[in-house]
Image (cartoon, grey):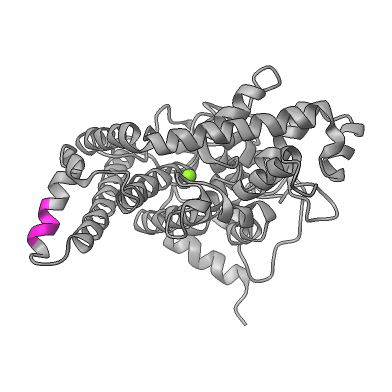
Amino acid sequence: MLARDYFEKQEAERLAPYGLRSAESRGRRYPEEEHPLRMAYQRDRDRVIHCSAFRRLEYKTQVFVNHEGDHYRTRLTHTMEGSQIARTMARALRLNEDLAEAIVLAHDLGHTPFGHSGERALGALMKDHGGFEHNEQSLRIVEVLEERYPGFKGLNLTFETLEGIQKHRSSYDGPGGETFHQPALEGQLADLSDEIAYNNHDIDDGIASGMLDQAALGDVVLWRENHAEATRRLAGAEERLIILATIRSLIDLLVSDAIRTTESRLTELGIGSADDVRRCAERIVGFSGEVEEKKAELKAFLYDNLYRHTRVIRMGTKAERILEDLFNTYLSQPEQMPSRFVSRLSEGDEIHRVIADYIAGMTDRYAMDEHKKLFDPHERV
Ligand code: MG
């Protein structure tokens, strides 16, 4: 039977000099025996997939709350689409595919119920108590909140996976005490894959839900060009299929532009190792100036027409009210939370943080059910 050292050797031969090699990982906080078969980042990816916060992504909002329909993206399917884009890019750039995949699979674990409105509500409630931010929360989940091993809290992921998850920190300490400014390329790429995934699937869901007007999308250069091309190529096909073809070519365009741009930046900057990337003042993975500009226009369109759509705003406001009510109830009477959260208080954890951890971990439907149980006298407690 083939063993881990064989795969590590194969991996080392295949990767670019700035791709991270599993065998050279800076390791885990709590030392563990290596797996006989799986390499370090493969193991990280598997740990993320098996954790409870990952399963709950299925019932968390991306843009559409779960009860609005079974066809829309959820946080889970968004995560899966993002991870496959990351794998394509990692493979093409000869970076570590397993690592990029592990980072994307973990990147949204810290999202609250009800997407960004939920995050806004928790952020306001936590304003004077350390704040709330979903990337930080993703990190808290994999470092502290998941309890699956007897010897330590969290998933004990490698330094490199954690580095990729904490994407929004402007600088951080490397294990040798050196200050790094950027995550390695696999982390940078995860960030971009996330964005490519949501820009495109939000158009798809937006049109399917009737909330985005396809004619209005014609004002957006990226859409107009790709839609015209798809219409020519698929002459006579029904519009639904042309829309899907347009979205496919948009993803292709963004992915290949990012790969090309990243390759030329790596050459220009003379990057020869992963630490060169980390020391670099600027992000290396990115789009060309032209595509960046067109993509910004698309994002602005989605912001105005989908994320600020009356239906999204109405649901968002309702969601904020639900989370505020839950938060204040637990604050005045912490015993209403499950015992594993209550017991953290006697261990000295700050009450606002305990409540935020509990609420952030909820799915949309759990939060709605819980709200009903607490506030609707007809509902069983
Ligand atoms: Mg995301």
State the image coordinates of residue 308 (x, y, percent, origin top left): 38, 32
Residue 229 in the magenta stretch? The answer is yes
Q: Is residue 369 above or below residue 96?
A: above
Camera-side residue of 327 and 292: 327
Residue 213: name its quadrant. Answer: top left
206 left or right, relative to 78: left
Q: Is residue 6 above or below residue 64?
A: below
Quadrant holding the N terminus: bottom right
State the image coordinates of residue 109 (x, y, percent, origin top left): 60, 46
Q: Is residue 270 above or below residue 200?
A: above
Q: Which residues are magenta?
A: 228-232
209 left or right, relative to 95: left
Q: Check the image and name the residue furthest to the right.
A: 346
Does the magenta stretch mainly form a helix, a strand or a loop?
helix
Residue drawn at (81%, 48%) of the image: 152
Q: Is residue 154 above or below residue 322?
A: below
Camera-side residue of 207 and 227: 207
Q: Is residue 173 visible?
A: no
Q: Is residue 150 visible?
A: yes
Camera-side residue of 345 and 96: 345
State the image coordinates of residue 178 (x, y, percent, origin top left): 60, 29
State the image coordinates of residue 40 (x, y, percent, origin top left): 62, 58
Residue drawn at (26%, 35%) of the image: 292
Camera-side residue of 13 and 311: 311
